[in-house]
Image (tube, rainbow, N blue to C red):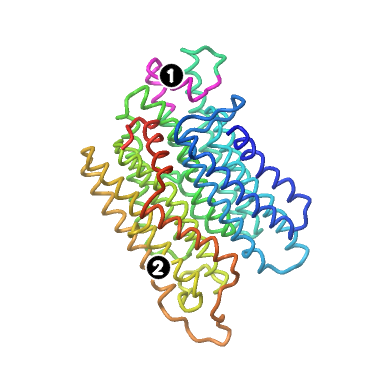
Amino acid sequence: MHAVLTLLIVLPLAAALCCLRLPPAAARLVTAASGAASFGLVLALVPAAAHGDISYLRLLRVDALSTVFLLATGFLYAAVAVYSLGYLSGRPGSRPAARFSRRFWVGLNLFAWAMLAAPMMSNLALLWVAIEVTTVVSALLVAIEGTDGAAEAAWKYVLLASAGLGLALLATIFAYYAGAQILGQSYDLGFTQLLAAAPRLHHTVIELAFVLAVLGFGTKMGLVPVHTWLPDAHSEAPTPVSALLSGSLLAISFYAILRYYQVAAATLGSAFPRDVLLAFGVASLLLAGLYLFGQRDIKRLLAYSSVEHMGILAIGVSFGAPAALAGVLLHVLAHAAAKGNAFMGAGVLVRKTGTKRIAGIRGGLDLLPWSGPMFLIAIFALGAMPPFGLFRSEFEIVAGGLGSGSYAAAAFLIIAVTVAFFGLAASVTGMLLRPAARQPEQPGRGEPSAWMVLPVVAGVLVLLLLGLHPPAELTELFGRAVALLGGRPA
């Protein structure tokens, strides 16, 4: 497994370096191969991580919890790498387009590398550094189109994310201070050491560290009220980048919060961290559900859906029951597949109609024989319709909430998710089902590129697999991860 960890940390970085020198035609193939290989390497980690931790060189450490998030990132990296083959093919073949392609391929690989590296870090300090790298690279990708709107969105993202990560750095410093009182000043903020010393850590310091971590990493996760960068960045970024931002980056930030949750629960008991997450989760779910109504931009609509699902994850952890925690982990994977599909489908609609305005997109099912129906499937999946993975995950979360006695929070979750689904459906119905006005310049029926369809088909299959019958190895992985979060395997 050491060789797998080494390849996983080296391969996307090597692909990015290669794309600096290769012509765009070769860079696109290198990126697609790197994405597919990285996902294969993550799959190879699953059996070993389900039975124990994997450590290497004191810097890398993978357990069941981190492997769940590696799966989400690995799958989306492979999917958007293939999707991007078609996404960039429609750009004119001028020298500026070639320069754009080179920057895009380099940035995409670096972004994936940083998000794969973050869950593999062995201590809280390295985890913070890896997430800071994701901020720098993703901000450049948000601004890559060079428009005024993209520059404004990237600047807003950098300001808010930097402020949030400043708070997260304070959380890291407080965690170090708490551990240094017990373990000595030479310890390196390693998860194992910190958890072993947790019962002896200073309670007030850990409380402060956890709240700062939720505020700080919650900025990158998109929790209300520190979410305001997210709709702008997701709307202005290239579609493959939007898919990675929503499906992977938000999840990686949530992973960082879960590491602090482990320490806080082991030190303070689970009541305090659960209450904090419940407050942020309820606010996020409530605001996002309301903002889904009346959106005018298709990508902003999906961005607020991401805020909604981050709220669901926070509420799920607040329930604390093993079933709810297992549902949260399943939700991470299912949301990555569904939101990736939704953004990739939205990208095809935008390419076909030439607009991101919801009012300007009509007749999607008629114009796009594959992407239209699969975009509708993605919206149904995001609305927790059976038989897709998000229905199963949200059912487990609600069942865990009811089982733990959190009746009011579980009832709120059901109502808010239903309201959010109606908000999504109201916009999507017009885009897909309402016939387009007959105009001479109306685009003809057909897909822009087969490369923009294939990864979405794969995403639908993943959603069905997660909803109908998750593999036994994955279920075993969830069980061990639940135990790490303080519950017992369901």
Of helix, strand and loop, which one carries label 2? helix
Of helix, strand and loop, which one carries label 1? helix
Instruction: State if disc 2 and disc 1 touch (CB < 8 Å).
Output: no
Q: Quadrant of the N terminus?
A: top right
Q: Main secondary structure of the magenta part?
A: helix
What residue is pinned by disc 1?
196
Q: Residue at x 58, y 54 (%)?
A: 241
Q: Residue at x 40, y 76 (%)?
A: 433
Quarter of the view holding residue 12: top right
Quarter of the view holding residue 407: top left
435 lies above or below 158: below
Q: Is 192 included in the stretch rendered in magenta?
A: yes
448 lies above or below 241: below
Residue 89 left/right relative to 285 = right
x and y, in percent, of residue 436 in the image: 47, 81
Q: Which residues are magenta?
A: 188-209
Q: Residue at x 60, y 41 (%)?
A: 114
Q: Of the residues shown, which amino acid type is indicated by label 2?
A: Ser
Q: State the separation of the CA atoms marked 1 and 2.
A: 50 Å
What residue is pinned by disc 2?
427
Residue 437 left/right relative to 387 = right
Answer few, some or many: residues within 10 Å of disc 2's Cα (few below 14, many 20 plus, some between 14 and 19). Answer: many
Q: Of the residues shown, which amino acid type is indicated by label 1?
A: Ala
- Disc number placed over residue 59 in the picture, else none: none
Q: Residue at x 52, y 12 (%)?
A: 184
x and y, in percent, of residue 23 in the image: 77, 57
Marks 1, 2: nearer the viewer: 1
x and y, in percent, of residue 490 in the image: 30, 38
Towards the viewer: 40 or 239: 40
x and y, in percent, of residue 413 in the image: 28, 49
236 lies above or below 441: above
